[in-house]
Image (tube, rainbow, N blue to C red):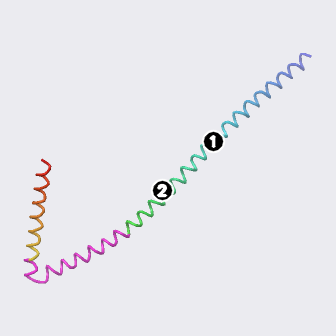
Amino acid sequence: MKRSSMFSQHGQSANAVDDILDSENNRMAENLATKVTRLKSLALDIDKDAEDQNHYLDGMDSDFMSVTGLLTGSVKRFSTMTRSGRDNRRLLCYVSAGLVAVFFILYYLVTRSRT
């Protein structure tokens, strides 16, 4: 009888250990599933953010291309004006001197208003 009771206790303790291991495995599997769900959500957010930034950069590219076109046209007109004759050069010097004077006047007014 002792022998059967020992096997019975051993069988019960083995079942108890199996139950504990099963519950631990289930808890860890749920924890892992939660983490996987969180990672999936983060990956989707990163993907959406990357798409938004790519769209924004594409828009900036087209804006820069249009500004480049405007600047190229302005440089061509400026070059044509400086090569066209002495009167245009004199006008260009007056305009440049006027812009420098306006800059210094504005600088003086801004620094004076801060004090």
Image coordinates of residue 34 in percent, x first then y, are: 62, 43
Which secondary structure lies at badge 1?
helix
- Residue under label 2: 49
The answer to if 26 sits in the magenta stretch is no
Compared across the picture, whether 62 is left or right of 45 comes to left
Residue furthest right as drawn: 1
Q: Tell me which corner region of the image, top left, top right, bottom left or bottom right, holds residue 3.
A: top right
Which of the two labelled residues, at mark 2 and mark 1, occupies the earlier sequence position? Answer: 1
**Which residue lies at the image location 48% right of the left edge and 60% below the top edge?**
51
Q: Mark 2 Cα within 10 Å, few/some/many (few <14, many 20+)?
A: few
Q: Mark 1 Cα within 10 Å, few/some/many (few <14, many 20+)?
A: few
Image coordinates of residue 68 in percent, x first then y, are: 30, 72
Compared across the picture, whether 63 is left or right of 27 comes to left
Going by the numbered disc 2, the residue's amino acid type is Asp
Quadrant that contains the N terminus:
top right
- Residue under label 1: 32
**Which residue lies at the image location 14% right of the left edge and 49% below the top edge?**
114
**Which stretch did the figure color magenta?**
62-90
User: Marks 2 and 1, Cα distance to the nearest angstrom?
Assistant: 26 Å
Query: Which numbered disc, 2 or 1, marks the residue closer to the eye?
Result: 2
